[in-house]
Image: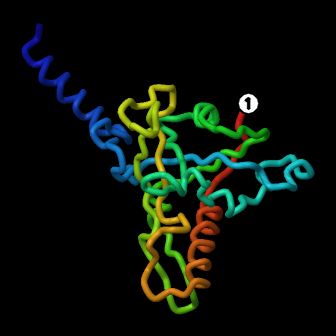
Amino acid sequence: MNKGFLPLFLKRLSSLLGSLPVRLSARRNLNPVPKTCNIIRLARPSKDYPEKRNVSAIQVDPLSFKPSTLDEASTPPHLSVWVDDLTTPKQAYSFLDKKSSPTLVLRLKVEEVCKIVGISSAERKHLGMLKVIWVHLFSDPKTKKTRDLRLGAEGHSGITGLEEKKPIPEGLTKQQEKNLRKDLRSKLAELASSELLDE
């Protein structure tokens, strides 16, 4: 074997692994998801979808980004999303308890999510409210001893900062808190691209 082959091979392999958007070592539970990643969120189309029948004409409902009761009860509370390099929309759909048809696939860039500036009033703006973290799934959510090994489980993540009980910036009134959460959801809806799940 050529003596120069192995070092060159290892160098190329290292370069390839280092360039992967989602490296294994970075996927520890509750660690930040790399900002180069894209995430998906599954939602129901708006009520006017049957009339339009055109996904490009569907306006994304900001309530699609409201954490569920289960999301709120999780530790930490988060909005359930999936990294699309690791989970396909069909795989994400298989994890839903309450399945609906049709289903809308919302796509976002982690970097853009983290740059969102929330507004609670005309005078107050808030940067860095939203973060995207890995949220591991377990076969038994209570003991959290065994990872869920179903296809697509590896990509489960969460957007933090949208939950009702999140510690918010000090000095805000209840109305300003409400305004801030509503504004964050609206900006996520504006950033999201949408498509129908191909069933």
Number of labels in the image equals 1
Q: Is residue 45 above or below residue 102?
A: below
Pointer 1 local density, CA inside 10 Å: few below 14, some 14–19, many at least 20:
few
Could you tell me which quadrant the N terminus lies in? Answer: top left
- Whole-percent x, y for residue 114 in the image: 45, 63
Residue 116's spot in the image, x, y percent? 50, 69
Residue 10 vs residue 177, the one in the foreground: 177
Percent x, y of residue 89 = 61, 37
Q: Nearer the viewer, residue 148 or 23?
A: 148
Task: Look at 47% across and 60% down and name the residue there.
Answer: 160
Q: Residue at x 62, y 31 (%)?
A: 94
Identify the image's colour scheme: rainbow, by chain, secondary structure or one colour: rainbow
Q: Determine which residue is flagged by label 1.
A: 199
Question: Which image quarter: residue 2?
Answer: top left
Q: Position of residue 67 (x, y in %)?
A: 59, 57
| Point 52% across, 47% down: residue | 39
Picture quadrant where residue 100 is located: top right
Query: Which quarter of the figure has residue 119?
Result: bottom right
- Amino acid type indicated by mark 1: Glu
Q: Residue furthest front?
A: 142
The secondary element bearing badge 1 is classed as loop
* Residue farthest along the top direction in this orientation: 1
Q: Nearer the viewer, residue 120 or 197?
A: 120
User: What residue sits 60% from the left and 74% below the top?
Assistant: 183
Q: Given the current orientation, which residue lies at the most extreme left position? A: 3
Q: Is residue 33 above or below residue 127?
A: above
Residue 122 vertical placement versus 90 (above, below): below
**Quarter of the image where the C terminus is located:** top right
